[in-house]
């Protein structure tokens, strides 16, 4: 059966998130996105691409049964070790797909999507890119506020110039300011034949759990394959030379300012707790 796949391309299950609320919010937001694009009930599928960072291991905990959702939500294995199928009562099954977010010495992050391979933090950006591209996943360079400026932006530009078109992607996220112009590197990606893949990238605050699934991209003509969904997804994404259709909205000025202030406070508190 041919469906439309609605994908949140940048997802964290932060420790402060209630796991039941996480999956319920994701299903609700993806269902609303499908309805807004005119998809009939049963004609769409949802997927969350995890980008776990640091010590985050929610995927492993869900897979091993150490993290158990509340009644009405069931997690089951698939034949693909990088994919879990999540059943929320009364909803279509949702795919939860493993992946990592890699912190580099330059401050530019790298995402490895659709893989359980772990690339360590603390590498240079170039090393992280090489290690990620050598995994069985898709490598994405995600936009972040202030993270593509000046010399760091040049690092991203060099990667786009040296890689074959479609072999990697850039990432957008729902925390970007709605009325600001898009980053210039998005235009370069479009010119050189690279896709931009959006996702929510929720901040580590409990209230942000409701954003999961509210921003992402849609893939039409999705062939629902319960046996190997991640292989089909990576095949589609790895061959993309243009950006797929977005769903959801970017952040307004008020929420953007509040989120950035909260994030700065969070980072300073975390730094203060970290032993030197």
Image (cartoon, grey):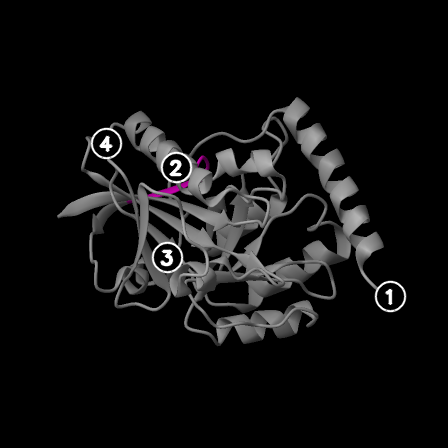
In-image side of 257 versus 208 (left or right): right
Q: Which residue is mark 2?
A: 24
As measured in the structure, the alpha-carbon distance from the residue carrying label 3 to the one carrying label 4 is 21 Å
Q: Are marks 3 and 4 in contact (CB under 8 Å)?
A: no
Q: Secondary structure at mark 1?
A: loop
Query: In screen coordinates, is 233 left or right of 192?
Result: left
Q: Position of residue 81 (x, y in %)?
A: 34, 69
Q: Residue at x 51, y 68 (%)?
A: 163
Looking at the image, is mark 2 or mark 3 nearer the viewer? 2
Q: Which residues are magenta?
A: 213-219
Helix, strand or loop for disc 2 = helix
Query: For numbered disc 3, what is the local secondary structure?
Result: helix
Whole-number angstrom distance, CA of label 2 to CA of label 3: 26 Å
Is residue 145 within the magenta segment? no
Q: Which mark is residue 39?
A: 4
Look at 27% across and 38% down and name the residue there. 89
Q: CA distance from mark 4 to mark 1?
A: 53 Å
Of the residues under marks 4 and 1, which one precedes in the sequence?
Answer: 4
Observer able to see residue 165: no
* Disc number lying in front (3 or 1): 1
Say which residue label 1 marks.
276
Q: Residue 129: x percent and y percent?
A: 58, 69
* CA separation in Å, label 2 and label 4: 20 Å
Q: Nearer the viewer, residue 142 or 95?
A: 95
Q: Which mark is residue 237?
A: 3
């Amino acid at each position: 059966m041919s469906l439309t796949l609605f994908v949140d391309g940048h997802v964290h299950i932060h420790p402060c998130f209630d796991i039941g609320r996480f999956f319920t919010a994701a299903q609700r937001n993806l269902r609303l996105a499908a309805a807004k694009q005119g998809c009939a009930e049963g004609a769409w599928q949802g997927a969350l691409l995890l980008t776990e960072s640091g010590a985050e291991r929610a995927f492993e905990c869900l897979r091993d049964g150490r993290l158990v959702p509340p009644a009405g939500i069931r997690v089951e294995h698939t034949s693909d070790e990088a994919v879990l199928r999540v059943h929320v009562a009364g909803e279509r099954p949702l795919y939860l797909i493993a992946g990592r977010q890699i912190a580099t010495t330059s401050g530019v992050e790298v995402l490895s999507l659709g893989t359980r391979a772990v690339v360590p933090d603390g590498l240079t950006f170039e090393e992280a890119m090489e290690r990620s591209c050598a995994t069985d996943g898709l490598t994405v360079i995600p936009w972040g506020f202030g993270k593509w400026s000046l010399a760091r932006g040049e690092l991203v530009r060099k990667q786009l110039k040296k890689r074959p078109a479609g072999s990697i992607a850039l990432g957008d996220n729902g925390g970007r300011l709605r009325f600001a112009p898009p980053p210039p590197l998005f235009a370069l990606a479009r010119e050189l034949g690279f896709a931009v893949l959006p996702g929510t990238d929720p901040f580590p605050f409990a209230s942000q759990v409701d954003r999961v699934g509210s921003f992402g991209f849609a893939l039409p003509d999705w062939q629902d394959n319960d046996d190997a969904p991640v292989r089909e997804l990576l095949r589609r994404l790895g061959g993309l030379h243009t950006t797929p259709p977005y769903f959801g909205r970017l952040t307004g000025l008020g929420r953007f300012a509040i989120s950035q202030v909260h994030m700065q406070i969070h980072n300073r508190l975390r730094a203060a707790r970290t032993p030197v």
